[in-house]
Amino acid sequence: MKKFAKILLACLCLLLASIAALLGYSEWTVSDARHYTYDDVNAVPYNRVALVLGTSKYLIGGSPNHYFKYRIKAAAELYNNGKVDYILVSGDNATVQYNEPRQMRRALIQAGIPASAIYSDYAGFRTLDSIVRAKEVFGQAHFTVVSQAFHNERAIFIARHFGIEAVGFNAVDPSAYQGIKTRVREVFARLMGLLDLYVLDKGPKFLGEPIVIGGPVPCQALSTIGASQPCLPIAPPPHKPKAKQAAAVSAATATSAAAATSGAPATSAAVPSEVTPVDNPAAASAATPTGSALTPQ
């Protein structure tokens, strides 16, 4: 019995040592991405788009979330200093009540950022989703990630794995007391990030149709103030006559030309009743020719 207990204890120690080694390796590997992050806005290189990673505006108890507050402040600082032209807010949109992109968009507008410069990604369920969708859906191979330093390191590590040349602008980190749970969770999130990339080969949960940042976006009829995308009405497609109508126009023109040649007046029977000025003004005009080309002078 004692021998079995010793074997069990040895296995447990080996397991714990393996987990500690993996956590240490993931921490060391991901932290190397800090070389691509900046604390000073003046040192940040220009990118067309800033990607703000999502978090809730309020904590579970209802108190303000300082991670949210400082990310919004950092994104506004980038825009106001001409370091980006557009801001893409990406986060979880799990329910109608919980909508991180909508909260971030409203906060940015309140901070003075034009609504037309803000785009929303409602499928940024994880950091990996937000990073990959910024490239695959929103067409950005170069962008500036906005979050706290520890989060930026993991986000940039993921971006570089997918061939995205991302840099990070570090938002202010809340105090150690406020962020202790988040920092502990980050240690395990880095290990899971390595597993997702190199073992499980995970990708975004959703992709979807491409969205052009800087171009018109279809209007949403039931949008609310601060929640909808900047949009322009989509122009209707140019009108094209139906095949029957086009054939009728050709027949009418041929009949009128024959009448002009023979000296007999063209009859109304040459124009089918379905081609009317109301249904197709262009066809009606062609069916009733005027001018020297068809009418004898």
Image (cartoon, rainbow, N blue to C red):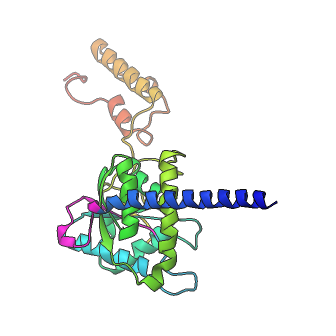
Q: Residue 41 lies in magenta, yes or no?
A: yes
Residue 60 visible here: yes
In the image, residue 264 sits, relative to residue 234, either above or below, namely above
Quadrant occupied by the C terminus: top left
In the image, residue 108 sits, relative to residue 90, either above or below, namely below
For residue 208, side relative to residue 50 (left or right): right
Q: How far from the left and from the top, in percent, is residue 147? A: 37, 69
Between 112 and 237, which is closer to the camera in this rendering? 112
| Residue situated furthest top in the rendering | 262
| Residue situated furthest front in the rendering | 3
Residue 126 visible here: no
Q: How far from the left and from the top, in percent, is residue 275? A: 45, 33
For residue 1, side relative to residue 146 (left or right): right
Q: Residue at x 52, y 51 (%)?
A: 195
Q: Residue 260 lies in magenta, yes or no?
A: no
Q: Residue at x 66, y 56 (%)?
A: 11
Between 206 and 36, which is closer to the camera in this rendering? 36
Q: How far from the left and from the top, in percent, is residue 4? A: 77, 57
Quarter location, residue 291: top left
Quadrant occupied by the N terminus: bottom right
Quarter location, residue 35: bottom left
Q: Magenta residues, as a range?
A: 35-54
For residue 81, side relative to residue 94 (left or right): left
Q: How many marks?
A: 0
Q: How far from the left and from the top, in percent, is residue 75? A: 31, 71
Between 269 and 41, which is closer to the camera in this rendering? 41
Q: Residue at x 36, y 65 (%)?
A: 152
In the image, residue 212 sits, relative to residue 95, either above or below, namely above
Q: Residue at x 55, y 56 (%)?
A: 18
Between 179 and 121, which is closer to the camera in this rendering? 179
